[in-house]
Image (spheres, grey):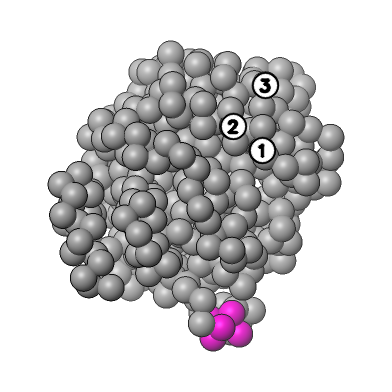
Amino acid sequence: MTSKLTEYLQDPFLNRLYSDIRKAGPIKAILVDVTHVCNLRCQGCYFFAEDMDKHKFPEEAEFDAFIEREKARGTNFMTLAGGEPSLILPRVKKLHDNFFITVVTNGIRKIPLKGFEKLFVAVSVWGDHETDKRLRGNGKLDVFAKGLKNYKDDPRVCWYYTLTSGNAGEIESVIEQCVANGNYVIPNFYGDVSGLGASLDHRGGFEQVRREINRMIERYPDKIFCTPYIVEVISTGVLYKEKWGYDVCCSITFDHAKNKERVKNGKPFNPHFRAYNPDLASTRRCCVGEDRDCSTCYDLWAHFSWIMLNMKRHLGSKQEFTNWLTTMYVFYSLNIFSGHQAGSALLPEINKRLRSLPTT
């Protein structure tokens, strides 16, 4: 392994990516549903699909104690979801002052720049204005338009664009609007956990969606924090002929009772990760639920981890190593390196090296 790694790192560009990651250090990550309250009820939201809002967020003293416990445990990175984090900004601020954090927000309430300068803000969008209004705005509120207004020219923002099987025709328009707004984009994929069917049914496959998002990556190589390799792995659920599912997911709560057998099966997992419910005391099986059917899971972060924790499999060739290393670099650029500008400057070269779809 060492000799192959040394060989691949003779490439100056790969060496730079690898050195930047090593310099930043290892990530000890958790996911926190920081509140049980939300100002939307998006159709098919995993949080409400499994009644996670029954876990009420704690009093301030317990919140502060949670911060100290995680600092003592060595946590350095949190993804904040919920619920809607923008509704409890004083608590988000406390976490921002102690950890690297990514906040997933619906965009209705603006998270100010002052005091949150190093925050990565992932603003959700599920389609163009009419689709987004139907799925997230109860057919009345244009959530996408509100988010565009709130985050105009905000350098912290990536639009967390959840792609559905039947919405490939909207992808170009949505991305054009996000880029014109002075923001970045990162694609996610929709799992139809509520059985809504039609254009939302993931069983329709993502082949057309995949072609369209890859076309947009070529068009906006410095604005889309993703690569054809990441898109391929998430949308197909295949990594080196291994099929996505609970037995291989790396984003499981390592000390949860339900995962006792999973951590023994020999497949990689994150030995630090926990998915906290809003009470910040209880945890759940994995990042997207307690009993989630994994065939409906296309979670971006979970699939990032699947690639990242399977480094050894990617050492068979320089191209395979490039697939792995660029995935790592995209993740670090989004969540750990300060600001997106430095990472985005390297995205054109990254995607140039990943022009053809990979062998998984």
Q: Residue at x 51, y 22 (%)?
A: 175
Q: Counting residues from the N terminus, which is met first, the one under dot 3 or under dot 2?
A: 3
Looking at the picture, which amino acid does disc 3 mark? Gly
Looking at the picture, which amino acid does disc 1 mark? Glu
Observer-side mark, 3 or 1, equals 1
Badge 1 crowding class, 10 Å Cα cut-off, few under 14, some 14 to 19, many 20 or more, is: few
Mark 2: secondary structure:
helix
- Residue 108 image point, x, y percent: 55, 27
Looking at the picture, which amino acid does disc 2 mark? Arg
301 or 243, which is in the foreground? 243
269 or 74, which is in the foreground? 269
Q: Is residue 114 above or below residue 299?
A: above
Q: Quickly name the residue at label 3.
A: 169
- Residue 248 image point, x, y percent: 57, 69
Q: Quickly name the residue at label 2.
A: 211
User: On the rendered structure, is 97 left or right of 230?
Assistant: left
Residue stretch rendered in magenta on the structure: 261-265
Main SS of the magenta part reads: helix
Residues tagged 1 and 2 counted as in contact (Cβ below 8 A): yes
Q: Quickly name the residue at label 1.
A: 207
229 or 23, which is in the foreground? 229
Q: Residue at x 50, y 43 (%)?
A: 357
Q: Residue at x 35, y 64 (%)?
A: 315
Q: Look at the image and tell me whether residue 137 can be seen.
A: no
User: On the rendered structure, is 101 left or right of 49?
Assistant: left
Mark 1: secondary structure:
helix
